[in-house]
Image (spheres, rainbow, N blue to C red):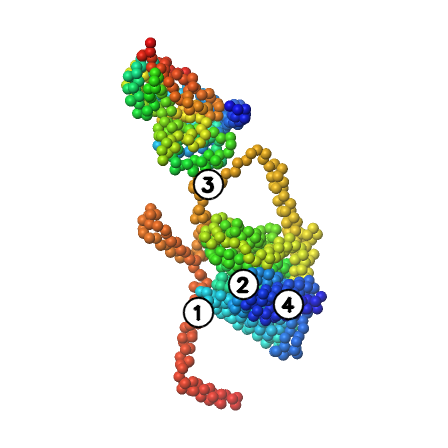
Amino acid sequence: MITAAATALLLAASLWLAAAAAGGLAERALGLRFATVLSTLGGASALVGGLLVAVHGAAAARTLGSGDLVGAVTLRVDPLAAVFVALLGLIALAIGLYAPRYHTPGGGTAWYTTVYNLGLLASLGVLVAGNATFFLVAWESMTVCSYLVVLRNHRRRGVARAAFLFLALGETGFALIVAAFAILAAHTGTLDLGLIAHRSSVVPAGWRDTVFVLALLGFGFKAGLVPFHIWLPEAHPAAPADGSAFLSGLVIALGVYGIALFGFQLLPQGPAWWGLLTLGLGALSAVVGVLYALMANDLKRFLAYSSIENIGIIVTALGAALVFGAYHHRELEAFLLIAGLYQLVNHGVYKTLLFLETGVVEHTTGTREMNALGGLVHRLPATAVISLIGTLGIAALPPLNGFVSEWLIFQGLFQGFRISNHLTGIVIVVAGASLALTGGLAITAFARGFGIPFLGMPRSRRAAEASERGQPIVGPGLLAAACVALGIGAPIVLTVLDRVARATTGTDIKARLLVPNLTVIPAHTGFSGFSPTYLAAYLACIAIVPVLIYLAGRPRARTRTVPVWDGGILAFTPRMQYTATTYANPTRVTFDAFYRPEFHVERASDDPAGRSGPVHYRFRVMPIFDRFLYAPVIRAVRWLADLIRPIQSGDVNLYLLYIFVVVIVVYLIYPF
Amino acid sequence: MTEQQQVEAELHERAVALFRRSLHIRTFDSGSCAVCESEIRLLSSPYYDLHRLGFFFTPAPRHADLLLVSGVAVRAADHALRKTFDAMPEPRIVVAVGACALGSVFTEDELVHGSVDAVLPVDVYVPGCPPSPLALLHGLLVAVGRLEEKVQAFRFDLRERNPA
Amino acid sequence: MIWFLRGLRRGVVTTRYPAHADPWAEALPTPPSFDPQKLTFELAERLAAACPAGALRRDGPDLVLDLAGCTGCGRCCEVGGEAVAASGSFELATHDRGSLLKRIPIGADRD
């Protein structure tokens, strides 16, 4: 099975390379289709390969070039990475189906296709990397390719700045990751990831802590953990829709992969505070993400903040897994790892779906601003249905996939009482409460995110005239089907993830996870249980009952149809509806201390009776992290740079003096 | 009347009989001086007490059985009056209240219809300017068939008073 | 408790109307009642002119009273003297608009 998987992955890589090469053909429609077909096939291949490895449940590695040489390349298939590979494949597949109808053929699309496929290739490289150098090279390539993906529409305002922010923060994270790998390699004497994992006990405890924190922060920059997230809400709106989908569905997931790699494989059996730190950052990200999501009026910005929230949930699950592992609760460690990976896969699926549909909305109506949309369920019916499935998934409503994974995470956190240390127990409880708050706010946020653009009456002329002709449906539709399948088919997903967890943590909890009758239990019998499959079947069945009642009891009397009673007004106008801003207003008022908005009200005159004409009301949420964290850091760096600037005076004589001094110093030191 | 009309009339009567002790009234002011509204408002007071008869006011036409219209049916209120009437489920009763609604004050011109029965099918007319609450109660009870009409038998050509 | 038991015993909660005659009803303003023997054409014209609501008019041999338009102001009673008095009837609701037009024969000129 491993050879089959390796073949599939190799095929995927070659197909993506070919697609990148064929990207130049995308100046024509046929060339674009050809390149995207190659990309899609590569995605399918990667999906198959990833699933094969995950099901196989054991790692295998192969080195090209000799052993410990820096230039040697070790490729490794590992079940943990395989989950991410499968996700990569599915996302590439969906985007490949979506791209031909989204992009217009031309020069920009040509180099975008090339860069995007190279990004896919680089992501695959990160996931199959067996040694540190290959990992870092692939990681950096993936960052650069993603940067170029964001720059697709570089002539628009704000895109260049957003891409720069992405790159700058990505590179900062990269620096930390390099440091982490360097320290590990120095202490274990090898660059091979498998060997590092074996020899990790050699590393002294203080250095292990440092490495973990460096890795957590470094990968946190890429994953979008608060407070390293400020690039996300800028980069996602700037990128084209499928680029945003790629960023949000996969690139962020690679950050999580890095954290999982260090936490579970390279530095196993860490102390509890590692897990608590991870848990804390995750819970903070979840709450901050959803709070800002509620204030975002741009659809893509809203989804970007929602990604931050979901990554927070995933990282909370992984952190809790580390905590349970440190206290030797092996089953719960494996359980929470499974739950975190499940949530990650689900997020990849529904977030990609939502971003792709946002792209359709933007193309058909010309705007991403929620306050200008409305009534799109009539104009874009297929898009609306698919978006609804994605929204129900991300809002974690049964019986879809989001509900199953969030239920698993909550069940894992609830069992924090099994840990003897009280402080740890309290932290876990607070994290659980934060996730509960996040869940409630997420439902509000997504009721708003789906309801305002799709339901009601159109708030602008372009929204009233949108048409679905020629818009991509198959790609997002496939992801919607995946949402439903991942929810109903939870037993299958959990079987596969159990094998992954067994390979990663050494604990097999299949018997304590899936019991007969397709029921899932959270690693301990008698605690709780739930069957997603039967729930879905049950919901489908009871939905039939009201239909039958209606059909049987249909009134035989003559019925008269009249419009909805509206108080006798002349007509509803779109201005009478909720806007996105007002819908989120109760939340804004409740969390006023967090948002600290700035208000700006303009009116033509102070006439209180309203005769002065329209009143313009603007409010802006205070960007806490930009202002209080990054701005001081940037100021400090500038100050330091100003301090150092005199060295670079531009005077040749000064430079000659430098050379002279250095030569003297070297002559003095050299004998020693 | 044709047989169909007879059947419909009987059906309507039997349906209306359902309202005898439980009636929900929706008032509508189609352009009055608001004195009829004052008298209608007095019906809820403890002295006249509408509720002891099982009658209630409701703001929602969907819940209403009887539409109590006062005023001259100004054209500006057409849309709202029509919508209110349409929103009432059948069986429904329309009662026109006051001299204005009965057409005795204003004639039809470009601002008013002049009388409510130019716009809606009126079942019971309650004259008065304004009709006192006792007259209104009588009118409502006639509309649901609990009391008989008296005015047809009244004579205004005798020095003796008409029977109460 | 007594109220509850009373209600249970009585069954139906709504009351009969009218439970008894209203003692203040006599003070209500009501449409006029005429004595045909004391009416003349000339009096009829003066009564029609005196009515501020236009509810009275002479139509041939009859004085027509439009009950719908009458406000019960009593000016016709002042002008008519012995021929006119308040009728005391205020329960005038009807299904048929036409029955609100009452014809009073002007009898003094009839032999």
Q: Chain of mark 4?
A: A
Amino acid of disc 2 = His
**Left or right relative to A612: residue A130:** right
- Mark 3 vs 1: CB contact within 8 A: no
Q: CA distance from mark 2 to mark 3?
A: 44 Å
Give the label on residue A10, or none.
Answer: none
Q: CA distance from mark 4 to mark 3?
A: 58 Å
Residue A254, image x, y percentages: 58, 65
Residue A535, image x, y percentages: 64, 49
Regarding mark 4 in the picture, which secondary structure is present there? helix
Specify whether disc 1 shares its chain with disc 4: yes
User: Vertically, is A63 above or below C35?
Assistant: below
Q: Residue placed farthest to the right in the image? A: A1
Q: Earlier in the sequence, mark 2 or mark 1?
A: 2
Residue A669, image x, y percentages: 50, 88
Q: Earlier in the sequence, mark 1 or mark 4?
A: 4
Task: Determine crowd level at label 4: few under 14, some 14-19, many 20+ residues with C-alpha closer than 10 A.
Answer: many
Amino acid of disc 4 = Ala
Specify whether disc 3 shares its chain with disc 1: yes
According to the picture, the residue beneath numbered tag 2 turns out to be: A103
